[in-house]
Amino acid sequence: MLLGTVSNPIELLFFGDIVGKSGRHAVQQYLKTLDNPADVVIANAENATHGFGLSQTHYQELLDSGIDILTGGNHTWDRKEILQFINEAHYLLRPDNLPIAMPGSGIRVFDIPLVGDKSFRIGVINLIGQVFMGNYNAPLERLRAIVPELMAQTPIIFLDFHAEATAEKITLGHVAAQLGVSAMVGTHTHVQTADERILLNRMGYITDVGFNGAYHSVIGMEVRSSMERVESLVPSRLEVAESDEVQVNAIRFKIDPEHGDCLGLERICQVITLNTDN
């Protein structure tokens, strides 16, 4: 989908939830195959460490693989070690509509270098939904407060809304487009939706980007343990599926660097086989 052309638009690549080792390796291998690398790469990493949370080791591993910024969600705090490093992890965001006393930040402006001495600024927002999710502060109210602050610094604004309910995501999407956000993605359900579009001729949007991880799985978890849990209704911890056959779920946006308008977007859904050296 392409609306128009602008000389040297910004290319923004976003990966849906990275689940476990298979997810990390899927994204790493995909990035190595790109003939036309994106100017900025963002990914949701709340499931990157064995499916639950993010360790400091994997935080650095993902940055070293070519991801510039990482976002979170309801599993951000699953590994308590994150409390020890999140305040110093400049390229890691957690949902911003949490109590103000929580460590970390859900909004930040990044200077992204381009070829030579050129660069651009991008404001990134991470929010979490309320419907079927938990007791969080209102994301819509926080969004209305955040966007004007960011637009005073840059016209390019990206939003990861980590939420369960489709209607809540779409509703927030319309508000975000009216406010002037450049691109918004939904995360959390791990099932990619086929509704990518440009709202109000301004904002690139998709309800859920999906996930990166084992292809033969239940949203990244082992099929057998998932079946047993559904059949017995006995609460149990799901195990992450690991496989050499993995799926890559992502979306790529073209953004006007001067005005922040989304000019086009491409949904990515691939199944690949990991190299044996991964």
Image (cartoon, rainbow, N blue to C red):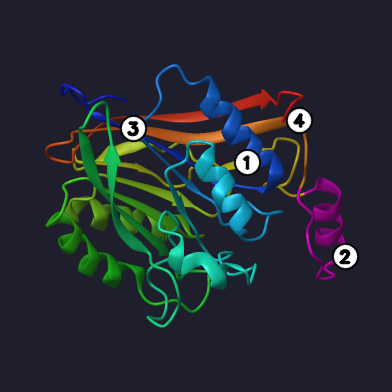
Q: What element carries label 2?
A: helix
Q: Is mark 1 on a helix, strand or loop?
A: helix
Sequence-wise first label, 2 or 1: 1
The magenta segment: 222-240
What's under tag 3, amino acid-wise?
Asp
Q: Residue 39 carries which label?
A: 3
- CA gap between label 4 and label 1 equals 12 Å
- Of discs 3 and 2, which sits in the foreground? 3
As drawn, 251 above or below 36: below
Point 21% across, 69% down: residue: 145
**Horizontal and vertical percent position of residue 235:** 81, 71
Which residue corresponds to mark 2?
232
Query: Are there few (<14), some (14-19), or many (20+) residues within 10 Å of tag 3?
Result: some
Which residue corresponds to mark 4?
244
What's under tag 1, amino acid-wise?
Arg
Residues tagged 2 and 4 counted as in contact (Cβ below 8 A)? no
Q: Is residue 243 left or right of residue 127?
A: right
Q: Which of 215 and 169 is in front in this view?
A: 215
Outermost residue toward the front in this view: 117
Q: In which quarter of the image is residue 255?
A: top left
